[in-house]
Amino acid sequence: MSSQEPASSFKIVISSGKRKTSVATATIKPGKGRVWINNIPLEVLPIEMARMKIMEPLLLIGDLRNTIDIRVRVRGGGWMSQAEASRIAIARGLVEYFGSEEIKNIFKEYDRHMLSGDPRQTEPEKWGRYSARRRWQKSYR
């Protein structure tokens, strides 16, 4: 072998997260603490609330975040749904990458949906109606 490191020391973890109709895939590998969401650096993300939501798992692990790079690809849904799907994918990936029960417990204590996802779904539309709950209006009475 040349001056490269053996393949076993280079670890890559791929994880996914879902929220409503958004699906995020996070790739975590050794690096300098950089995070990209759909090839845009996290620091440049225009919506501050979404940026803070995505940063939550990174802030909870402390200085360990400076040892990895994260690339997230997220599709579908609205911007907040995408942010929460990205957050779930990052949190799951961090637990798998570091293999630490302590990190898992920190995430569960902070917000259990960070690892398990949010089970809420939209209610299906009923027959003979415009939407799930809305009925026809009556003009007599």
Image: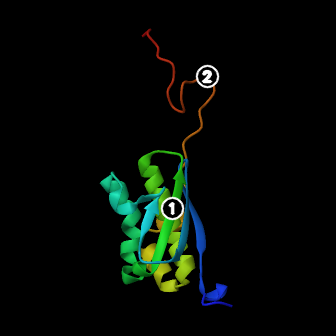
Specify few, some or many for label 1: CA neighbours under 10 Å numbering under 14, 14-19, or 20 or more. many
Identify the residue under disc 2: 128
Query: Which quadrant of the structure image shows residue 10?
Result: bottom right
Quick check: 131 above or below 81?
above
Tag 1 or tag 2, which sits nearer the N-term? Answer: 1
Q: Residue furthest front?
A: 2
Residue shown at the point (32%, 55%) measured from the top left = 49
| Left or right: where 53 falls relative to 3 | left
- Colouring method of the image: rainbow
Is 29 in front, or is 140? 29
Residue shown at the point (45%, 62%) measured from the top left = 36
Is 120 in front, or is 7? 7
Q: Secondary structure at mark 1?
A: strand
Is 118 in front, or is 136? 118
Specify few, some or many for label 2: CA neighbours under 10 Å numbering under 14, 14-19, or 20 or more. few
Residue 12: x percent and y percent? Answer: 59, 76
Residue shown at the point (55%, 68%) measured from the top left = 27
Inter-mark Cα distance, 2 to 1 = 41 Å
Identify the residue under disc 1: 72
